[in-house]
Image: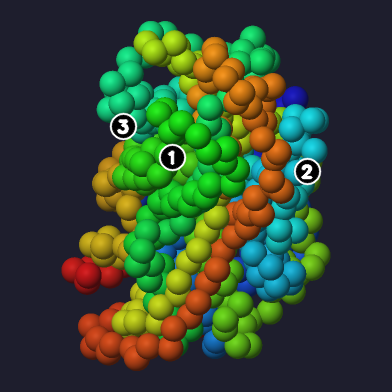
Amino acid sequence: MCRNSLWTILLLFIILSQGCKRTDPVPVGSIVAFSLREAQTELKNKRDIIDSSLFTLGGITRFVGMVIDRKNNDIILIGKKSSHLPISTMDDLVVALRSRLKYHDLPMVSIDPVSNTTITGRQEVRFGGQIQNTSFGNDLLNCDILLKKYSLELEKQIKEVQSYRKLLLNDALKTLNQGGVKPVKITWVNIDSALRYRGQGLESAITNQSRFWFNYRDPCKVRALDDVFCLLTLDIVVEKEVQSINNVTGSRDGDVDTSIPDEEFANEFSNNYYTISETYPVLKKIKLLFDMTAIAEGLNKTKDIPDISFLLNEYEVKKVDTREDFELISMCAIIERSDGKINLIRLSGGITPEIEMEWLNAGDVTYLRKYVLESRPNSRSLFWKVNVDNWEMPNNTGIRKERIPSKNDRQSGCIFNSESIVLSPVKSGKSEFMGFPPVKASEPYNTKGVQMNMIIDNESFISDSSLNHVRDTLLKKNQGKKEKVWRIRIDDKK
């Protein structure tokens, strides 16, 4: 091949490469704006070359809210790009949008016992909001499974969060000690191993059912005003509920009251949520999914939203198989006591996450519109950097501080059944232990699963002239521009 031909091919390659190149990527640490209008247009037209940033929402890893641009018939998502948080995806966003806007439901997943669970050893996996067989539903389910296994010490433990199993056992030992009884030997075994005590006297038996679920720390505030939605601090916590469902009265020395362990587990997990998320990144993802659902709810409460019918009805979400059932994990602690009696403590079940959010209208957040729209390079931009370098972004708990490089820088829901039994080697006409369950089981506890309850209060708005200035600046800068993604700069604004 002649030299001229080689130069021609090289020149053609350079031209094609430049022709396919978008604007420079938004740097890590930036506030990012992402246009749903432009994303939908590209997906609908099925262009041969689609920017990968379309499927990662411009690299957003933590949402702060959205702006509805009525003039350009656009919905613009706003968030931060961080290097240590999971990247959002178009598929997950579409699932959240469809759940609220198309199916009028809320994303939910729950692993629940059914009437024959004690026989089959299987629990039912339930989904709500049509999230089954999606990455969204699979991630929520994986959080459910992780929290169940962590609670039972079947996953790696961190020192800040004790397992529910450990807390329950410690409380049982404390109760014995207060009654002057010392533990001689403690072992954790499978359920079948407890059958060695069949026929011994059943002095007492109590079954408590504990439920844990995810929620946002109260108070949860989501501000909304003039087509601007802003998520404030929405930290995830674990809440709890316990009820006694089966009892055989008698001796109470050693029966377990789960109220204290329940409270301790919920508090430790809540106070160390971001710490434990570093060990288990799937917990970071659940925060992202919850925030997407909050944004979808914002659109659900908005009249005459811009057209996103293609995303709601035609966009093909990648199928991810989700399981239909899950095994019932059970374990039993045997406490041999100094008085010759035996304590059996059985744990079974898992975590059922749930979301309950309250939406409050409070404060003027319309300044976001100004900075988002003014920083858009042109009206066809898919995503762009929002120039708000000195802005203290809401909903930022758990995000590490990251320096934004300058242009001169180089490339830089859980259900737990806890059964506490006291056995005596002397029958004395008492009931006999014949295995688990010690008494007739009640109907499975009806759970609500992973579910969002969102309420918008009609509170008065607080006017803020500085925020209005931000809004005006954004609108002014965007006149006649057509960018999909752009950076917003709000210097020295808080």
Please provide percent x and percent y for residue 304.
63, 88
First in residue order: circle 1 vs circle 2:
2
Q: Coloring scheme of the render? A: rainbow
| Amino acid found under the numbered disc labelled 2 | Ser
| Amino acid found under the numbered disc labelled 3 | Glu
- 345 with respect to 270 (left or right): right
Residue plotted at (55% across, 14% down): 426
Please tell me whether mark 3 or mark 1 is closer to you in this view: 1
First in residue order: circle 3 vs circle 1:
3
Q: Are marks 2 and 3 in contact (CB under 8 Å)?
A: no
Which residue corresponds to mark 2?
115
Which residue corresponds to mark 1?
258
Please provide percent x and percent y for residue 453.
55, 68
Q: How many marks?
A: 3
Gap in Å between the C-alphas at discs 2 and 3?
36 Å
Please provide percent x and percent y for residue 28.
38, 47
